[in-house]
Image (cartoon, rainbow, N blue to C red):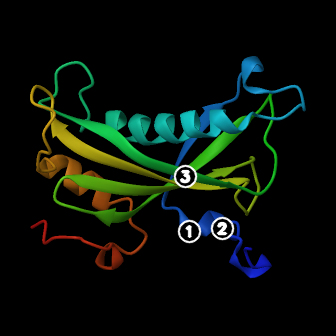
Amino acid sequence: MTSPHSRPLPGARSDFPQFVPISTRWMDNDVYGHVNNVVYYSFFDTAVNQFLIERGVLDIASGTSIGLVVHSECDYFAPLSFPGTVEAGLRVVDIGASSVTYEIGLFAPGSEQTAAKGRFVHVYVDRQTRRPAPLPPALQRAVVALSSSPGGVRGRRDLA
């Protein structure tokens, strides 16, 4: 049996150095009147990939490497619903030779605590062989910028 003290706590807005706005859609709500749990994972994917595309480090059509999701998880704290905007906070908590672990906080506009908080792990692979590939330097620089304290990112290599 799980101890009541083991439940994760909501994150704070100040934990996240970057935010991506995402509009909710009519179809996101379930019969209970709030965004269905499966949609939160779509928000994670959208926030991370929108950030990478806007930084010019993800070419979804012809890049030589692609990021595959190998793990995701989510803890829920408060409902979100349509109509509205979700403010997705991003930070990087781990950088490996070919992987990046993101933490995403989903916030209702103006809220100081996450409605949901999750992790999302991308492993970068060669587009053709699907074998792990080193993170391209531009991608490394972009994800290091998502750390609230770059020296504290686990697994960070010297990117100079």
Q: Mark 3: few, some, or many residues within 10 Å (few <14, many ≥20)?
A: few
**Residue 73 in the image: above or below residue 36:** below
> Measured from the top left, where is residue 38 in percent x and y?
64, 35
Spatial CA distance of label 3 from label 2 is 18 Å
Q: Secondary structure at mark 2?
A: loop
Image quarter of residue 153:
bottom left
For the C terminus, the quadrant is bottom left
**Sequence-wise, which precedes: disc 3 or disc 1?**
1
Q: Secondary structure at mark 3?
A: strand
Q: Is residue 123 left or right of residue 25?
A: left
Residue type at mark 3 is Glu
Q: Are marks 2 and 1 in contact (CB under 8 Å)?
A: yes
Q: Which residue is mark 2?
A: 12
Q: Mark 2: few, some, or many residues within 10 Å (few <14, many ≥20)?
A: some
Q: Is residue 55 left or right of residue 10?
A: left
Q: Nearer the viewer, residue 142 or 8?
A: 8
Write the residue at 78% across / 41% down.
80
For the N terminus, the quadrant is bottom right
> Measured from the top left, where is residue 10 in percent x and y?
70, 66
Q: Which mark is residue 15?
A: 1
Residue type at mark 1 is Asp
Q: Is residue 133 left or right of residue 51?
A: left
Q: Secondary structure at mark 1?
A: helix
> Measured from the top left, where is residue 115 in percent x and y?
73, 53
Write the residue at 59% across / 38% down.
21
Q: Mark 1: few, some, or many residues within 10 Å (few <14, many ≥20)?
A: some
Q: Which residue is mark 3?
A: 73
